[in-house]
Amino acid sequence: MIDTVLQEEARSAGKKIFESAEIFKMVKDRGMLATPAIVAEKIIELLLGEQFTQGSVIDVG
């Protein structure tokens, strides 16, 4: 999970507005969110690394 503005909005919404707000708050409080910069670095590492052949399709689902 990535700590984005949408995450912040979900955390700050009350349970009446967004039932899962407490879950999003708990994830943030436990330090389980990655920053956008860290996620971008990981994606760049994957794309430029030698783990995958350039032009190949990566399916992690």
Image (cartoon, grey):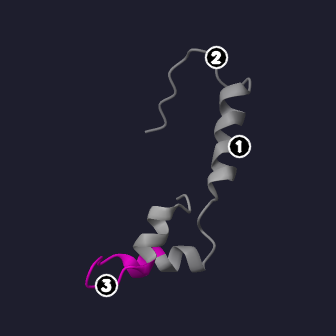
Q: Which numbered circle lies on residue 27?
A: none
Q: Percent x, y for residue 24?
A: 45, 74
Compared across the picture, whether 58 is left or right of 41 comes to left
The residue indicated by pointer 2 is: 53
Tell me whether the residue at label 1 lies in contact with that at label 3, contact meaning CB atoms closer than 8 angstroms.
Answer: no
Tell me whether the residue at label 3 lies in contact with that at label 2, contact meaning CB atoms closer than 8 angstroms.
Answer: no
Compared across the picture, whether 57 is left or right of 38 comes to left
Which span is picked out in magenta? 12-24
The residue indicated by pointer 1 is: 41
Seen from the viewer's position, the closer of residues 24 and 57 is 24
Quadrant of the image occupied by residue 45:
top right
Q: CA distance from mark 1 to mark 2?
A: 19 Å
* Helix, strand or loop under label 2: loop
Residue at position x 68%, y 51% from top?
37
If you read the primary sequence from the N terminus, does the residue marked by circle 3 or circle 2 appear first?
3
Residue at position x 40%, y 72% from top?
10
Q: CA distance from mark 1 to mark 3?
A: 34 Å
Residue kind at label 2, given as amino acid type: Thr
* Helix, strand or loop under label 1: helix
Say if the magenta span includes residue 14.
yes
Query: Does residue 18 sit above or below 43 in this rendering?
Result: below
* Helix, strand or loop under label 3: loop
Q: Main secondary structure of the magenta part?
A: loop
Residue kind at label 1, given as amino acid type: Glu
Q: Percent x, y for residue 18?
A: 30, 76
Q: Percent x, y for residue 9?
A: 43, 71
Residue kind at label 3, given as amino acid type: Lys
The residue indicated by pointer 3 is: 15
